[in-house]
Image: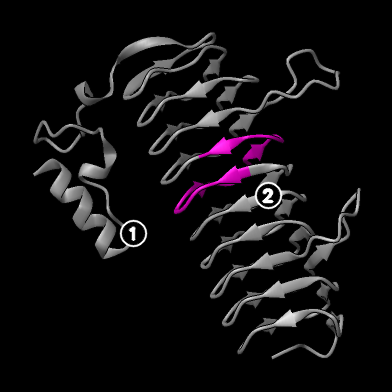
Amino acid sequence: MIHPSAIVSPLAQLGDNVQIGPFSIVHADTVIGSGTVIGSHCEIGHPEQSPTSRPLVIGADSHIRSHSVFYAGSTFGAGLVTGHHVTVREGTEAGRNLQIGTLGDIQGHCSIGDYTRFHSNVNIGQHSEIGNFVWIFPYVVLTNDPHPPSDIQLGVTLEDFVAIATMSIILPGVRVGRGALIGAHSSVSKDVVDDTVVAGSPARFVCRAETLKLKNGLSTSAYPWRRHFHRGYPEAVVKEWLAEFS
């Protein structure tokens, strides 16, 4: 299950049925869960810039695609899935079933909940705190430096069920409330209230999220999105959502 061209440290801990692709490197102090697939030309467990002897832990049944780099000192729950050319720095703590799109960049020292989805070309600044079931669409940036360049870092906070549309930027220290929607091409400099829609540059309040309708001809509310969108989520979770809105 390990390609002959791959370099795997004898100190790395690999679970059952782990696959390591051509020309990939797995460093010491790396723990890879059973059933995980590592694509070609990956570097797993790259040494931290300031070593603290923390391992990189990749949960079971994960799939890291080619040309991705994961630094030591991070932990990922089961079911991690990435696109290609992903970079994840040290100090990232993520839950189950995180998805990171192609060219995703997580700068480390951040926390991410369960079943969160990052599309391609998403940049997550250090000290970001991201909840469960969050959607971040392409080219979104979460920033952290209020006076660039400086040594001050104020991470962004995204609460559960937030959706951030493409090419938006969230400025340092902003908190986006549970179930909020950030419209495309927005620059968000102020906290966002739960279940509201903001958009523009600078972003301003547009409406309550539940007033938006799906374009399905049935006048169904588009938000909260968990009322109608269930693809890829566990049956038990979907049942909880349906009960919430029954």
For residue 172, side relative to residue 214 (left or right): right
Q: Give coordinates of residue 117: x percent, y percent.
A: 49, 49
Identify the residue position indicated by label 2 in the image. Answer: 92
Q: Which residue is mark 1?
A: 233
The boundaries of the magenta stretch are 111-130
Q: Could you tell me which secondary element the residue under label 2 belongs to?
A: strand
Q: Which quadrant of the rendered structure holds the C terminus?
A: top left
Whether residue 148 is situated above or below residue 137 in the rendered picture: above
Query: Splitting the image into 4 quarters, where does residue 206 fall?
Result: top left
Question: Which residue is located at x 21 percent, y 45 percent?
Answer: 228
| Left or right: 162 in relation to 136 | left
Magenta segment includes 127: yes
x, y percent for residue 147: 79, 12
Q: Residues within 10 Å of mark 1 (few under 14, many from 20)?
A: few
Label 2 CA crowd tier, 10 Å (few <14, some 14–19, many 20+): many
Residue type (three-letter) at the residue carrying disc 2: Thr
Q: Position of residue 39 (x, y in %)?
A: 69, 73
Mark 2–mark 1 distance (CA, rounded to whole Å): 23 Å
Q: Is residue 155 left or right of residue 163?
A: right
